[in-house]
Image: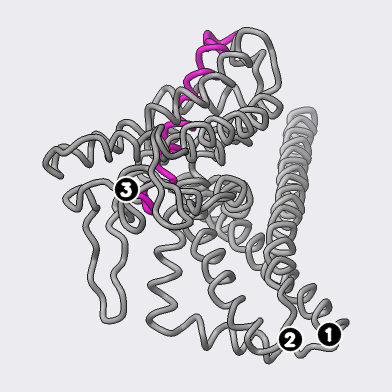
C-alpha cells in the first residue's frame, strides 16, 4: 500500500506541476505585455489605465462581442492552416495566397452554377479546399523532391496567386463590373450559409466550419498515426526516417492538408457577407494567422482564444483611436503580445527542464546514498 501511495502522490505532483507550468506562461506573457504597452503609452504622454478601461468597456458590449466572434472565424481557420505546418517545422507562409486563390475559384464556380443550396454549398467548400490544397501542394512537392525551402516557394506563390486573380478578375473574363467594383458573378441566395440570430446582429454560421476544423485538427494530430508521424518528423527527420516514417510523403500530405484548411479561410466572407470575390475581398488574413498560431502555441483551444483576443484588439482599437489615442497603438499591442508569449513560453519551458533535471538528479543521488548504506550494512553484518 505504501508503494501505491507513493506512486499516486508522485502522479499528483506531476499533474500539479504541469498545471502550474501551463498557467505560468500565459500569465507571465499577459503581465509582460500589459507592462510594456503601458510604458509605451506613458512615454507618448497617454494614460494607459484609461485606455484599458475604454477597451474593456467597449469590448463588453453585445454588438462588439458578436463582431469579435465573426472576425475570429477566418482568423482561427488561418491559424490552423499555419499550425499544421508548424507542428512539423514547415513554415507555410503562403496561406494568404492559398485562401485568396481558393476563394476566387470557389466564387467563380458558385456563380456559374444554379444548384439547390444543399448541393451548391458543399460544391463551393470542396472547390475551395481542393484549390487551396493544390496551391500549397506545389510548395510541398518542391520541398519533398527538390529540397526547395517552403518559405521561398510559398512567398513566391502568394505573388503568383495575386497575379493569377488579377488576370481573371476582369470584365469579360471571370468577372463583371458594378460601379467601381469588379467581382465574380454573385452566387445564388440559396448558397449563402445560415446565420445564428442574436439580439444585435447574427453570428456567421461558418463558425460551425471553424469548430469542425478545430476538432479535426486536434483529433488528427493527437489521436492518429499520421499525427504521430507528423510530430515525429517535426522533432527529428532522421529519427522519424529510421522508425519507418516516409518524410517526403508526410511533408507533401501536411502541405496538402494545410492548403485545404487555408482554402476555407475566405468562406466566411464569401458565404456570409459578399456572395462574390471582388477587388475589395479581404487580404492579409494569412499573415495574421501566423501570429495567432504563435500566440496559441499551435493548440486547437489556444488558437481559438488567440483569434478572439486578436478580434478584441481590432474592435477596441478603433474606439481607442476615436478617444484620441494613437492609431498605431493596437499594432504595438499585438506585436508585444506575440513577442511576450513566445519569450514567456520559452522561459517557462527552460525553467521546467532545469527543474526536471534537478528532481531527477536529487532522486538519483538519494538512490545512490540508499544503495551505499545497504552495502555498508551488508559489510558490517
Q: Is residue 78 left or right of residue 349?
A: left
Q: Is residue 218 left or right of residue 44?
A: left
Residue 87 found in image quarter: top right
**Residue under the point 31% across and 66% down:** 203
Write down the residue under mark 1.
42
Write down the residue under mark 3.
209
* C-beta proximity under 8 Å, tags 1 and 2: yes
Against 220, residue 225 (above or below) is above
The part of the chain drawn in magenta is: 242-270
* C-beta proximity under 8 Å, tags 3 and 2: no
The scheme the figure's colours follow is one colour
Question: Considering depth in this image, is 314 or 240 the residue closer to the camera?
Answer: 314
Residue 74: image location, x then y, percent: 45, 52
Residue 185 found in image quarter: top left
Examine the residues drawn in magenta and state their main secondary structure: helix
- Give the mark, 1 or 2, whose residue is nearer the N terminus: 1
Amino acid at each position: 500500500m505504501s508503494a501505491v501511495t507513493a506512486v499516486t502522490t508522485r502522479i499528483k505532483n506531476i499533474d500539479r506541476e504541469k498545471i502550474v507550468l501551463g498557467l505560468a506562461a500565459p500569465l507571465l506573457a499577459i503581465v509582460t505585455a500589459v507592462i510594456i504597452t503601458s510604458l509605451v503609452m506613458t512615454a507618448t504622454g497617454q494614460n494607459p489605465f484609461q485606455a484599458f478601461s475604454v477597451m474593456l468597456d467597449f469590448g463588453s458590449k453585445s454588438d462588439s462581442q458578436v463582431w469579435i466572434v465573426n472576425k475570429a472565424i477566418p482568423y482561427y481557420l488561418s491559424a490552423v492552416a499555419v499550425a499544421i505546418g508548424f507542428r512539423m517545422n514547415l513554415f507555410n507562409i503562403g496561406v494568404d495566397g492559398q485562401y485568396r486563390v481558393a476563394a476566387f475559384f470557389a466564387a467563380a464556380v458558385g456563380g456559374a452554377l444554379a444548384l439547390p443550396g444543399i448541393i451548391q454549398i458543399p460544391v463551393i467548400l470542396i472547390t475551395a479546399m481542393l484549390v487551396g490544397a493544390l496551391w500549397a501542394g506545389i510548395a510541398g512537392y518542391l520541398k519533398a523532391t527538390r529540397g526547395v525551402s517552403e518559405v521561398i516557394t510559398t512567398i513566391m506563390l502568394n505573388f503568383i496567386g495575386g497575379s493569377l486573380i488579377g488576370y481573371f478578375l476582369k470584365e469579360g473574363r471571370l468577372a463583371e463590373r458594378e460601379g467601381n467594383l469588379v467581382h465574380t458573378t454573385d452566387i445564388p441566395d440559396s448558397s449563402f450559409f445560415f446565420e445564428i440570430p442574436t439580439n444585435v446582429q447574427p453570428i456567421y454560421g461558418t463558425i460551425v466550419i471553424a469548430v469542425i476544423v478545430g476538432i479535426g485538427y486536434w483529433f488528427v494530430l493527437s489521436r492518429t498515426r499520421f499525427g504521430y508521424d507528423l510530430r515525429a518528423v517535426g522533432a527529428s527527420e532522421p529519427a522519424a526516417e529510421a522508425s519507418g516514417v516516409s518524410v517526403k510523403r508526410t511533408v507533401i500530405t501536411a502541405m496538402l492538408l494545410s492548403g485545404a484548411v487555408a482554402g476555407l479561410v475566405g468562406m466566411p466572407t464569401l458565404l456570409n457577407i459578399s456572395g462574390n470575390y471582388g477587388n475589395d475581398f479581404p487580404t492579409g488574413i494569412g499573415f495574421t494567422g501566423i501570429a495567432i498560431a504563435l500566440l496559441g502555441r499551435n493548440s486547437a483551444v489556444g488558437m481559438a482564444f488567440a483569434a478572439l483576443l486578436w478580434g478584441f484588439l481590432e474592435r477596441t482599437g478603433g474606439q481607442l483611436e476615436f478617444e484620441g489615442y494613437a492609431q498605431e497603438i493596437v499594432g504595438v499591442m499585438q506585436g508585444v503580445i506575440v513577442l511576450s508569449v513566445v519569450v514567456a513560453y520559452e522561459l517557462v519551458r527552460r525553467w521546467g527542464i532545469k527543474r526536471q533535471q534537478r528532481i531527477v538528479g536529487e532522486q538519483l543521488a538519494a538512490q545512490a546514498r540508499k544503495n551505499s548504506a545497504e552495502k555498508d550494512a551488508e559489510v558490517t553484518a
